[in-house]
């Protein structure tokens, strides 16, 4: 016989319904219970509908921590919750206010702009429950840098992030993950669910289960694709992109003018970048510098510098994340 023990922050209607579903699964597989008995259990157990505000869950990223994958391949597959896609993020206030659903999941990935965005969102939904995903500091900043180069910027990695003097394009404070947790606690009424990118890579379904449990939603494993949403550009392409960016003017590098003009400049810049990145595929390797885009020694330095911050995040998750425990009894 299997006994399930649950600890969850608040037992909403959806949570009770979910637990009923789990119990029904156990009844169906248990000896001595008929299909009629299972059906009777479902029919007789009723859940009262409350008239309170909808429950809102808010995924805030971080950017470059599987956000795009979750937004397009996982969140839309969750059942029992209304998903507000990242492209509708700015409309989320109006969508939630209409209250056409009793439960919403809002997603938008942030990094340096996190505090500004959680301040705005909490101004109308301070009771939202936040989901945040961290990626180990060295891996995360390396991914941010590759995106920076892909978008037509020519900084070297040491110019992008400078651990020793903090004179880089990105400041050290942007890599202080535990401060981001404290910021979320400052603006919202509930502690966030803190997850880690490594968990997703190691055991995807266990990772997704944590989100489903937290949001009191369900999904079918066969509906979830484990393939990434986007493929990364290779080292050779990025080296050539960075080289070109240093010597060739890319339209829109410093967008100016009104909103429409800035958008057109940005699109023209992206178009040039894509052309360069595609052309780079055909450049012989012998013509490209053998020096790594990012030296391992630089990444090791970052990992060591932020080790304490990483451990604080791990401990926070261990101490505060809701837990679903399965206990097997003979």
Image (cartoon, rainbow, N blue to C red):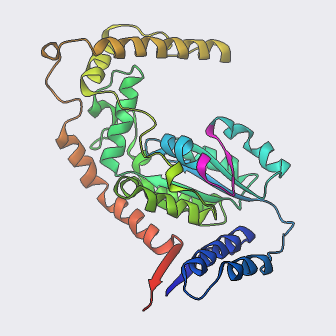
Q: Which residues are magenta?
A: 76-86
Can you say whether 125 is above or below 253 in the image? below
Does 84 lie within the magenta span? yes
Q: Residue at x 68, y 59 (%)?
A: 128
Q: Residue at x 47, y 45 (%)?
A: 225
Can you tell which quarter of the image residue 316 is in? bottom left
Is residue 37 rendered to the left or right of residue 276? Answer: right
Quarter of the picture containing the C terminus is bottom left
Looking at the image, the residue that sits furthest to the bottom is 330
Query: Is any atom of residue 72 visible in this view?
Result: yes
Q: 169 or 273: nearer the eye?
A: 273
Position of residue 305 measured from the top left corner of the image (x, y, whole percent):
28, 53
Is residue 257 rendered to the left or right of residue 74? Answer: right
Can you say whether 111 is above or below 177 in the image? above
Q: 25 or 301: nearer the eye?
A: 25
Position of residue 121 measured from the top left corner of the image (x, y, whole percent):
69, 49
Query: Is any atom of residue 110 visible in this view?
Result: no
The total number of labels drawn is 0
Q: 102 or 171: nearer the eye?
A: 102
Does 256 lie within the magenta span? no
Can you say whether 41 is above or below 245 in the image? below
């Amino acid at each position: 016989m299997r006994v399930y023990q649950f600890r969850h922050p608040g037992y909403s209607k959806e949570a009770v319904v979910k637990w009923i579903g789990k119990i029904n699964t156990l009844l169906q597989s248990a000896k001595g219970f008929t299909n009629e008995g299972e059906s009777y259990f479902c029919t007789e157990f009723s859940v009262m509908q409350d008239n309170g505000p909808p429950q809102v869950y808010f995924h805030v990223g971080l950017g470059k921590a599987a956000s795009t994958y979750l937004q397009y391949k996982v969140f839309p597959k969750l059942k029992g919750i209304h998903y507000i896609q990242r492209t509708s993020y700015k409309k989320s206030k109006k969508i939630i206010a209409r209250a056409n659903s009793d439960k919403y999941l809002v997603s938008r990935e942030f990094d340096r702009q996190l505090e500004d965005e959680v301040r705005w969102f909490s101004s109308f939904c301070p009771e939202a429950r936040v989901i945040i995903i961290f990626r180990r500091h060295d891996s995360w900043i390396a991914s941010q840098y590759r995106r920076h180069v892909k978008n037509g910027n020519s900084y070297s990695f040491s110019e992008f992030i400078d651990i020793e003097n903090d004179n880089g394009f990105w400041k050290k404070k942007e890599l202080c993950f535990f401060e981001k947790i404290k910021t979320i606690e400052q603006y919202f009424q509930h502690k966030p669910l803190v997850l880690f990118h490594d968990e997703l890579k190691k055991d995807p379904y266990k990772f997704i289960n944590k989100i489903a449990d937290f949001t009191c939603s369900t999904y079918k494993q066969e509906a979830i694709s484990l393939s990434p949403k986007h493929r990364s550009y290779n080292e050779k392409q990025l080296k050539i992109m960075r080289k070109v960016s240093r010597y060739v003017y890319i339209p829109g590098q410093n967008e100016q003018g009104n909103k429409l003009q800035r958008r057109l400049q940005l699109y023209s810049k992206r178009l040039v970048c894509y052309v360069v990145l595609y052309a780079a595929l055909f450049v012989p390797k012998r013509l490209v510098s053998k020096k790594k885009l990012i030296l391992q020694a630089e990444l090791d330095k970052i990992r060591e510098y932020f080790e304490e911050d990483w451990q604080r995040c791990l401990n926070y998750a261990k101490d505060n994340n809701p837990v679903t425990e399965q206990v097997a009894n003979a």
